[in-house]
Amino acid sequence: MIRLDKVTLTYPDGDRRLVAVDHAILTIEHGKVLGVTGPSGSGKSSLLALAALLIRPDSGRVVIDNVDTSTLDGDALAALRRDRVGIVFQQPNLLPALTAREQLVVMGELSGPSSRAHRAARRRRADALLDAVGLLGQADRRPAELSGGQRQRVNLARALMNEPSLLLVDEPTSALDRERGAAVVDLVVRLTHQLDVATLLVSHEQSDLDRADAVHTMVDGRLRDDRSLLSRPRREEDACTTDERAHASSAAGSTTHRALPRAERSR
Ligand SMILES: Nc1ncnc2c1ncn2[C@@H]1O[C@H](COP(=O)(O)OP(=O)(O)OP(=O)(O)O)[C@@H](O)[C@H]1O
Ligand SMILES: [Mg+2]
């Protein structure tokens, strides 16, 4: 669960301060997707950076799983971020030399013990997550050997490797065509429900947010509840029009009956 309680962030702007996030209030429960949309420069990525504990707010509180992060020092913030927060940035920032599986396994190694049993558990979780995003068959490929949509799906799987309780996704479809973008959003929604994470999905693409549980619109740093965006037909009623999307959807669905192996660390 994440709660932002009247969070304000300003940046230096000449001899004044630019208000990027203005007294933002939001709550996301486990298993729910909150969509945030709004024009360029309205403060969406700044909001995400606050939720990710990458920047401290000027005022207000960010509460993650009942921990008031304003009380934590830098080391404790970094540990909380590593253990509880998964981030998917706009551009998949995968390491060129590593295979898809290794991208995930390395993530697990940042926080877990290094015994043989733990390494095997991490590999099992990595493979289950790659299966969940429809890419187990590509586990041994490097980023240059994957399509843009596949890279973004590896990015999503990697963000989930350490069993975060909070998933933050910034404009995941902006570098993708419509169908591949829809497949990535389908996976974000399905895995949010399946893994019971609280998800903040930022997109200026309103169709990306059709399946969110709630949508807020950001204008000039201010958030407002926007129910009108939820009245559109739900994407589930659309036909699956490409193999990639159908594959991504069925792959995610296939794991609902088979629990993902947990990493070695429990929250
Ligand atoms: N590091 C920074 N220093 C100063 N100003 C910044 C910084 N980062 C962002 N800003 C400003 O803060 C405001 C909000 O930026 P932000 O990146 O959060 O917007 P956004 O809604 O994510 O936009 P986009 O849709 O283009 O990604 C903008 O006016 C931007 O110029
Ligand atoms: Mg942005």
Image (cartoon, rainbow, N blue to C red):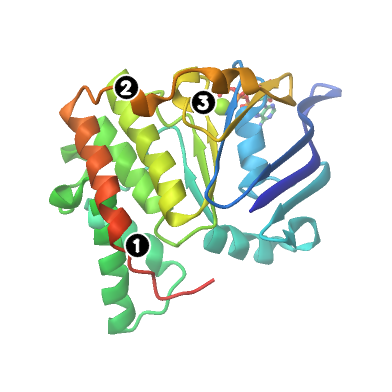
Where does ligand 2 appear, by image quarter?
Answer: top right
- Residue at left 46%, top 47%? 192
Q: Is residue 94 visible from the viewing direction of this image?
A: no
> Which x, y percent locates residue 207?
45, 20
* Amino acid residing under circle 2: Asp
Ligand 1 near label 3 (Cβ, under 8 Å)? no
Vertical side of 263 occupied by 142: above or below: above
Point 26% across, 68% down: residue: 124
Amino acid type indicated by mark 1:
Val
Q: Could you tell me residue 74's position as x and y percent?
A: 70, 61
Q: Quadrant of the C terminus?
A: bottom right
Please state the horizontal and vertical placement of residue 153, each as a whole percent of the image. 31, 41
In three-dimensional space, the C-alpha distance between marks 3 and 1, rounded to whole angstroms, equals 28 Å
In the image, is residue 102 above or below residue 38?
below
Identify whether 16 is placed above or below 79.
above
Which residue in the protein does label 1 denote?
106
**Amino acid type shown at disc 3:** Ser
Query: CA separation, marks 3 and 2?
Result: 20 Å
Q: Nearer the viewer, residue 123 or 102?
A: 123
Classify residue 230 by image quadrant: top right
| Residue named by callout 3 | 203
Residue designated by label 2: 238
Left or right placement of residue 251 versus residue 34 in this view: left
